[in-house]
Amino acid sequence: MSWPVVAIGDCVEKTLTWNPLLSESKNEFAYIDLSSVDKEKKEIVQHNVASVLPADAPSRARQLVKSNDVLVATVRPNLNGVALVPDQYDGATASTGYCVLRPKIKKLDSQYLYYWVQTGTFVTDMMEKATGANYPAVSDKIIKQSKIPLPSLPEQKRIAAILDKADAIRRKRQQVIQLADEFLRAVFLDMFGDPVTNPRGWDCYKLEDLVSKPITYGILKPEEFVSYGIPMLRIQDLKNGAIDVKSEFHLVSEKLSGQYKRTVLGGGEIVISLVGSIGIVARVPLELKGSNVHRNLGVIKLKDSSVAEYVASFMQLPQFMTILERVSKGGVHKLLNLADLKEVEIPIPTMGMIEKYTAIKEHVSGLIAKSKAAEKELIFEALSQKAFSGEL
């Protein structure tokens, strides 16, 4: 089926901006920044939306949004940061890091557009057109110049309804994954006790005594993105306690990576965020052997790989944040110093219990991986491709 292909800009209305710093209002307003959107669920997360006084507004708080606007993040690492503005945020302010798309109601359906900007066709096109050194981005103009297949409005609504059902299935799978994570945390606490109080009286060891080489951070000054090079892990690559080997990593030259041999990865290490949202933890998959890390990540290489899964799980518990809060420095922008991290004490149970827990986690992780694969390969992506090519 052949549909006309038109520029998105021809199907959307002009949106308004404002400068809250010039406002005389004393009332708080909802501010949607890049961290407000869950990039996996493609939705605005309420507890991540800040309530801000005009006088305290960030410089990027400029765009006024309405319900059913489609937000598309314009900075390359966040291009999958897409959301449909719900009714509760009608009149809120969004960061200039978003392109705000407000469909003309007689020409373009919001749900249809919302699903289009999630497609591989759109995201890949924007990735290729992103420019800039450290933080490649696309402009609003480029997004609005991009093309979208445009069937009749009833057909758009029909396609959106189909994708709504597929999305509901995808969300249920995500809930299963979340429940699996909660199950593993419950198993850990049941087997080993609260890590803060150590009620079982396990022997404790400083983290620096468990590593095979000093804990350190990565590349200080990443150079401009290169098309072919060494993957450099950043904080945004650590998601839900894991690193997706299929992510689009920032690539650096072999020469630059070679200057930071101390953090060249062999696979199996634990990486932890040191600034901003401190304490985000993940293990490095073996597929990323030879990669490097950004300065915002610390690399922990344990002497005994058999305890790595246990230690990683320990550090991923919410209770571990209590431990980090005791040693972290800084105010709003938190900083976890390596000297303090090395002093963190880790209770180590018997090897028999660690092996039992590791086996349980590996089994559950395998089920999660299968669920994720089914979600991506069999349901939503396949349906999206067919929907926007007129095959449904």
Image (spheres, helix red, strand yellow):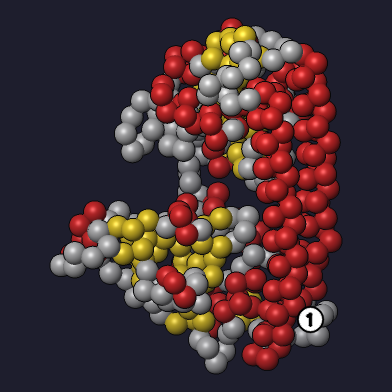
Q: How many marks?
A: 1
Residue at image location 72% in from the left, 85% down from the top: 158
Which residue of the protein is positioned furthest toward the left in this rendering? 24
Q: Is residue 338 above or below residue 75?
A: above
Residue lying at 68% horizontally and 65% vertically, measured from the top left = 119
Name the side, left or right, on which 302 lies relative to 342.
right
Residue 27 at x, y percent in the picture? 23, 65
Please identify the quarter of the rendering in which residue 248 is found: top right
The picture places residue 369, in percent across and down from the top left corner, at 79, 45
| Residue 108 in sight here | yes
Q: Which residue is mark 1?
A: 390
* Position of 29 relative to 234 (above/below): below
The amino acid sitting under disc 1 is Gly
Q: Is residue 112 left or right of residue 69?
A: right
Q: Quadrant of residue 1?
A: bottom right
Q: Give the quadrant of residue 14.
A: bottom left
> Residue 293's spot in the image, x, y percent?
58, 29
Query: Where's the C terminus, which quadrant?
Result: bottom right
Badge 1 density bin: few <14, some 14–19, many ≥20, Cα 10 Å: some
Is residue 332 or residue 119 the one in the foreground?
332
Compared to residue 366, the image places residue 122 above or below, namely below
Q: Residue 163, position in %: x, y?
A: 72, 73
Q: Is residue 255 visible?
A: no
Q: Is residue 96 left or right of residue 25?
A: right
Furthest residue in direction front, as rendered: 199
- The residue positioned 77% from the left and 14% from the top of the image is 351
Q: Residue at x 53, y 31 (%)?
A: 319
The secondary structure type at the circle numbered 1 is loop
* Nearest to the observer: residue 119 or residue 228: 119
Question: 207 or 5, which is in the foreground?
Answer: 207
